[in-house]
Amino acid sequence: MSARYGMVIDLDRCTGCGSCMIACASENNVPSLPQATARTGLTPLLVRKVSNGEDGERRRAAFIPIMCAHCEHDTPCVKVCPQQAVEVDKATGIVMQMPQRCLGCRYCMTACPYHARYFNWWDPAWPKGMEKSLNPGVAVRMRGVVEKCNLCHARLHAAEEKAAAAGKREIDPADYEPACAEACPTGAIRFGNLADPDDPVSKEARSPEAFRLLAELGTEPKLYYKSKEAWVRALAESNSARNSEVQHG
Amino acid sequence: MKLTRRDLLAWSAGAAAGLIVTPIPWKILDDTSIWSQNWPWIPQPARVPVEIRQSHCTLCPKGCGLRVRMAAGWAVGVAGMKTHPTSHGALCPLGFGAHQLNWHPQRLREVRHRGNASSWNEAHAAFARASSEGPVVIIDGYPGRAASSVYESFAEKNHGEYRVFRGTELRSLNPYESWTGVPVTSLGYDLENTQTLISFGAPLLDGWGTPGYVTRLWSEKSGGVDDPQLRIIQIEPSLSRTAARARQWLRIHEGSESALASGLARVLMEQNLVPAHPPIPAITISDAAARTGWSEDAIQELARTLVSRPPALAIAANENPTVAALNVLLGSVGARGGIVRKEKISHAYVSASAAISTARAVLIDSSVPWDFAPQTDAEIFRFAAWNGGPTKADWLLPAPGFLEELTDVPTAPALPVETYAVAPALVKTTFELQSAAQFLVGIDSSLTPPEKTIHDRCADLFKNRSGTLHAPESIAIAKIESVQQLKEQLWKGAVWVGEASPPGGLKCELKEWPPEPIPATAAGWADSWQAPVLPPLASKLYIESNLRDAPERRNA
Amino acid sequence: MRTGRIAIAFTVGVLVALVLGWVVFPRVLYVKKNQPVDFLHKTHADKSGIADCSECHVIRDDGTFAGLPPMEKCAACHADKIGDSKAEAILVNNYIKTSEETPWLVYSQQPANVWFSHAIHVKRANLACSECHSNYGESDQIRPYEVNRISGYSRDIWGHSMSRLRRAPHEGMKMSDCENCHQKHGVEAGCLGCHE
Amino acid sequence: MASSTLMDARWIARGEERAPLSRFLLWLAPWIVLLAIGVYAAGLCLYYGLNQTNMDNRFAFGLWIFLDLGIIALGAGAFFTGFLVYILGRTELKPILNTAVVVGFICYSGAVSILMIDVGQPLRAWFTFWHPNTHSMLTEVTFCISCYLLVLSLEYIPLLLRNRQLKQLPSFFVFEHQLHKLVPVLAAVGTLLSFFHQGSLGGLYGVLRGRPFAFRTGFLIWPSTFFLFILSAIASGPSFLILITATVEKVTGKKLVADRVFRRLGYISGLLLALYVAAKSIDTLVWLNFTSRSEGFAPWQFYSHKPFGTPILFAEIVVLGLLPACLLIPETTRRRRWILLCAAAMACSGVLLNRFVLTVQTLALPTLPFDDFLQYRPSWQEIASFGGVIAYGVILYSLSYRYLPLFAAPKEGDPPHVSGH
């Protein structure tokens, strides 16, 4: 039985606190390097602040978490990788980035319309002793390779192993939740199996309220958003960055 | 036979041809690529089993429930405890990186005296001498713990003083303490029942109070909901995170919150929107409009909104008597959805101010924010797990860091119910640490050590038979069979929650309309964060992204 | 004459390269290390009646594999010396009495980026231990651990045969070996299935 | 000094006049310095990693990719001349053939070395051969460029062996002769390989569905840029050969190639350029009106960010495309050497501009509605490596010119001028 994991993020519930970003980095042993900047840092999950472009009291702001959308169809990064370091996992639909295979050509980064892929510009490093706090399930990446959200695959591994030990073929959905969804204090990030019609997240993704960024590119991303605020939806669904006032600072 | 150049060429050609059919080039190609996948200067996590432990965050007094992933005696990941009755699985963003804090480069690893390395023995001797020579002031940032009782008894026995540093949430409750006599630690905001919540700059959705308590209520009742049961109206000069997500953001001139509160009070009274008639504020509606930059109509409309969906509650960012008086006018003090009194009345603590007149020594607990700098000539003994930069303290004493000591977790500030939990020492320590309480017990062995106090408190809880244990299923305390069982549960991360007290029991009348306070603002978690340093991963929020502005104080 | 001489020089060149590549190179590439204790699987199977690998190499309830048994497991029987072999003395004096974990060198150690689940292979796929680990359990001789100087991998990953052409059936634990077995059994895992 | 001059003279082809060694070394000196700096910069990138560059997560490709695409386009003269001479029998172009091979070799080896620095893990670059993803344009590029570099080396070796000293080794002479017989085959293989990798380099960006500025539909698996790149490369290649040869003539003060060879090259370049401009115009119209809109993007928004306005599009197609084509095709303009040279320079610039727009503008443009338009400034290490490749080219060409018979008049008399097309 093949699953299609995806997310629905309720933008109306996102307060932009950033818990998901830190939980993600911690789960996946992403380093925080003193040299890194907003353009060279590693943020497999990045919450972006957007505004309606107005000034004064008419100004409104919202927060849009951006991560790998795990495009299902004609996945831009998969088809460009010269050495099969990226693939759409058949069993889960996870677009899997293999840092050990990657040669760091960064072609996939130019292919990704969401800028959800990050390059390890430096070798990872931690202050002395802090390597003891690394998550045992996730291998640390070396410099010179691309990384991105793998949907906390170490948790999927743990769930699979647990199921196998218990003599089951399918994992218990309760055992597999990515760190961001787990961390979200308002439940804005919801994770589920889009292939399961009864899954609440799958239902939500099919509701008319749900939308996707750059859906017209035709890549069938599995990262859905929803918002009741008209300006948020208009902004997120427009394909044009006409508004030069748009601020994500 | 002489070797010629031609022989050498032929030999080289043969060697090159031969080399291709040996493993040398291919194995080197393969092995160097494998080497590049595992090059040795990159740390790799240990291959050890992961064990889940539940506990509580003790970095600040909000006591959020933790789900800690442990490997080989170290914490390797932190998440919120989903079943926690007040924090509901949420943590502040920094909490998610807290397990790395113990290795922060700014960690205090040795006793330091005026910038030089010293020892615990010298520190003991110095403090013992000082306390015999004159009064000692002990400042605590996290009252109500077993450690706090050590400080209190020490201060009492040595004719010293015990003072408590209050965070912004407690400070916002200060006016009610002075009006009702109920200490701030026994007061709370009953947000569960509030329908209209007007915040005068309080970062309600950005780490205010127990973050999970507020955000869960908001996300269940308000975020993305068509007809919200909790309407947050944010009064703030700039578009903060809370303002961005509130039902309504009303922009106001910097520092005019009190003027608006007074103006609203005037409208409420003049238009008979509320029954009570306390003293009328001096400010006129047109004055309030001028100060806030609003129209008079806007103030009147807001006043009507406030009474349209009761209960309404106003929360100030800091100590603000006019906002408190507005609550009195709205009838929110001692009422459902307003300011309530917890069942158990603790005694009032002297609030710590920076000015300390007569003291021979000042001992500052590690829970007091690093920036708190007493103005005194006394010898300062500063306990801290992390060095937050330049300090006036004479002694820097390395205190336990994240999850390194057994401590109890009393009720978080501003919560409407009593809670009690325990955070056992989960992780190993690699150097010599002492908490301030251990330090004092080491000097005066007649003091009750914190472990004993925690045991006594558990015994009391068991004896009183009231409240519920959340562990993670709820168990009424009456069903617990022994103190031992209770302790076991608490050590495994259970939380005791007291009975909700009935509304009322909190009488508050104003004799005169309070004067405007000096404006003071509060930032979100950055302000309530008690540790002097941030986890390295916090750089994701303010350097590697543009999500937040960098806090002013940052230790790389 | 001239061409003959060239042919000889060429052949000598080829031969030198072959000797260098097939005889000298493997010896230079791998460093031999001895295990801290001369542990014999056979002795334990025969004398102490340990019948099953899983008695010491445990799969935990959550599915994780404990790998080599901890010191307490050895100490349960070897609290005091059993017999007076040299290995026994080393075990008891250096490790059990100091309660220090024995720094075993793991022949089948995979790198950090590999995720191999014993639970899935043993419990779900019902593979016998010997399918991958050969007959270690019956070995009556401890062999040295050989480590690749460049990659740091155990020699067992590549296999003993340098050419990888004439290998014993269970020799080699490179990715291609995993892939071959998966293909043979018709099990598709994808990258995600085995890498972290 | 005297003995070294003598040594040097022994390597120079008989009957050829070359500048004194001291002057030659003086000429080389600045280029050697530039190369040394470039090698040092490249070493920094290899040792410390790509943090030495100013590229970042959104500007993941930078100056170097522009360099690769640019010099490979200009290096197309090598395969195309070989194709014209050996396959189409345009033997009148033979005098330029050696230069074409050297220039091609320089361009391709330079591009491959920059590519090796540009990847984050060069030690694993061979995985592309072992685990190739056949759907990736980059795989096609890697395979074809590697193979074609091998072909160019095989074409370069006979030239090398024709050096006065090396020629004396009998076995080398035999080898050279055998290899020389292979040249037509190599030319054919080179043409095939080049056809594919020039196209794949175009496809590299054309397939990027996620970058609507670059994305193109096309024929079967190939986006239109695949064909446009081939066409523009073979249009600019001959022009580049004209420029190089004319520069060498200027520097050495010798007449190396007959004017009619220049004019012939110019004519070929002009014709192809005209064809390219036509194709590019159609492609642009299709893209503006259909491709981009089908992805939901109003195409003119791509030109709303300064300095990448529509003037760039105009310059690319008209000023540096149509105009040089118009100058190169008619005999009257082509006859004037300065017009020929200017037009050739314009044609090369036009193709370089096309490569620049496709690589740099594509990355600078926003894709998400709340993205910024980005700017990027290469670091000195990137610029120095770039300069190092140029210096490497100049040095290798200079050495080849000095010691190899690049322009030796072919003995088998020149065929008469072929007229009419």
Image: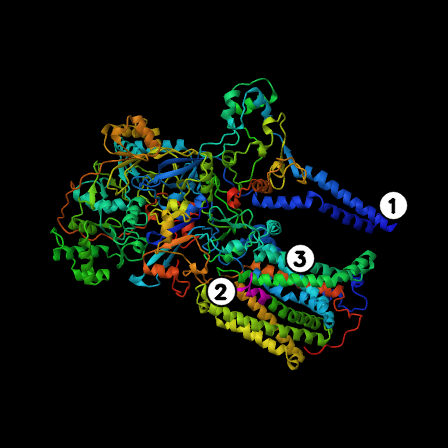
Tell me, yes or no, whether the highlighted magenta stretch contains residue C43: no
Name which residue type carries label 1. Met
Determine whether B440 is above or below D324 in the image.
above
Residue D213, disc: 2
- Specify the subunit that label 1 lies on: B
Q: In the image, are marks 1 and 2 on the same chain?
A: no
Q: Residues within 10 Å of mark 2 (few under 14, many from 20)?
A: many
x, y percent for residue D371: 43, 60
Secondary structure state at the residue bearing disc 3: helix
Residue B548 position, x and y percent, is 38, 53
Which subunit holds the residue at mark 3?
D
Whether pointer 1 and pointer 2 mark residues with C-beta atoms closer than 8 Å, the reply is no
Q: Separation of disc 3 and disc 2 at Cα? A: 31 Å
Q: Position of residue B41 (x, y in %)?
A: 55, 43
Q: Which residue is mark 3?
A: D147
Please report the bounds of the magenta region as a residue range.
D217-229
The three-letter code of the residue at mark 2 reads Phe
Residue at the bottom extreme of this rendering: D332
Would residue B48 be found to the left or right of residue C19 on screen?
A: left
Given residues C143 and D121, the one toward you in this image is C143
Q: Nearer the viewer, residue A80 or C181?
A: C181
Other-residue count near label 1 (Cα within 10 Å), few / some / many at <14 / 14–19 / ≥20: few
Which SS class for mark 2?
loop
Judge whether residue D228 is colored magenta. yes
**First-in-chain label (3 vs 2):** 3
In space, the residues marked 1 and 2 are separated at their CA atoms by: 71 Å
**Who's the residue at 48% across and 59% down the image?**
D210
Is residue B350 visible in this depiction of the protein?
yes
Q: Is residue B350 left or right of residue C16?
A: left
Quarter in which the N terminus of chain D is drawn: bottom right
Residue type pointed to by label 3: Cys
Percent x, y of residue B225:
28, 52
